[in-house]
Amino acid sequence: EIVLTQSPGTLSLSPGERATLSCRASQSVSSSYLAWYQQKPGQAPRLLIYGASSRATGIPDRFSGSGSGTDFTLTISRLEPEDFAVYYCQQYGSSRGFTFGPGTKVDIK
Amino acid sequence: QVQLQESGPGLVKPSQTLSLTCTVSGGSISSGSYYWSWIRQPAGKGLEWIGRIYTSGSTNYNPSLKSRVTISVDTSKNQFSLKLSSVTAADTAVYYCASSPVAAAFRYFDYWGQGTLVTVSS
């Protein structure tokens, strides 16, 4: 079973700052099967990035994804007020299906 | 654009079976373009994938829940459903239905329902 670990647990930043979120897998993950989501309180998750680095439809270009193997990163280049939320990474494996990381909360400093 | 809406009882007694339905609009569940999944999230915690179904009725389940889960599809109603048996308080969560495209070389959830809170309590 592939376990995803996200760090940090909480990231306290100010609007305009750069956010760097990490997602580490216990075994190598296909980049095609790595996605990132944003979730705000009381809302369903929203797809941001798929295939490790492809932005979903309508996602601003301040969001970018990178990485391969066991280490993946979501970067928000300049935080906007609406970006303060919880971010989850997700991977897919043919034997066990989908798993999510525990999330990183980006809150206002 | 595909829209999903969960429905079902918000309160289930321990040891009973949780039953939820997801109604799909803006597209046909029979199109074969999507897998249809259930995902849950306990309050203040992370996301857990429960399982998925394809138009044909083929299913895949989270191994940790497999013994208690049944997902089915009703193409005539454009709906798919979740049954989770022998529930305990640990099954209290917001339950989401979501879609993931079949044809893509990628695996992700692009459309989500708004979620429905199910509480297990006597």
Image: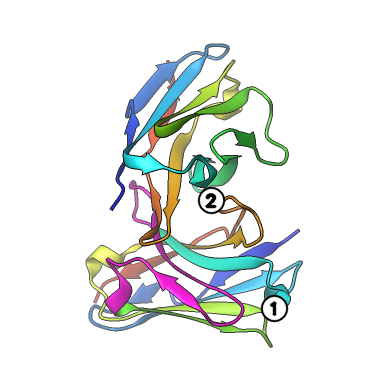
The answer to whether residue A102 shows anywhere in this view is no
Q: Please give the name of the residue rendered at 69% of the width and 67% of the height, measured from the top-left corner.
A: B33
Q: Vertical placement of B30 versus A35: above or below?
A: below
Both on one chain, marks 2 and 1? no
The answer to whether residue A76 shows anywhere in this view is yes
Tell me if A27 is positioned left or right of B31 in this view.
left
Q: Chain of mark 1?
A: B
Return the x and y of residue B65 as percentages of the image width and height.
30, 70
Q: Chain of mark 2?
A: A
Magenta extent:
B41-67
Name the residue beneath numbered marker 1: B30
Q: Please give the name of the residue rendered at 68% of the width and 25% of the height, measured from the top-left corner.
A: A61
Return the x and y of residue B60 as percentages of the image width and height.
43, 71
Tell me if B8 is positioned left or right of B101 in this view.
left
Q: Secondary structure at mark 1?
A: helix
Q: Which quadrant is the C terminus of chain B positioned in?
A: bottom left
Residue B76 on the magenta span: no
Return the x and y of residue B23 as percentages of the image width and height.
63, 74
Q: Nearer the viewer, residue A77 or A95?
A: A95
Name the residue beneath numbered marker 2: A44
Residue B45 on the magenta span: yes
Q: Nearer the viewer, residue B55 or A79?
A: B55
Tell me if A60 is positioned left or right of B13 in this view.
right
Q: Residues within 10 Å of mark 2 (few under 14, many from 20)?
A: many
Q: Quadrant of residue B85?
A: bottom left
Q: Please give the name of the residue rendered at 66% of the width and 40% of the height, measured from the top-left corner.
A: A56
Amino acid, disc 1: Ser
Amino acid, disc 2: Ala
Q: Residues within 10 Å of mark 1 (few under 14, many from 20)?
A: some
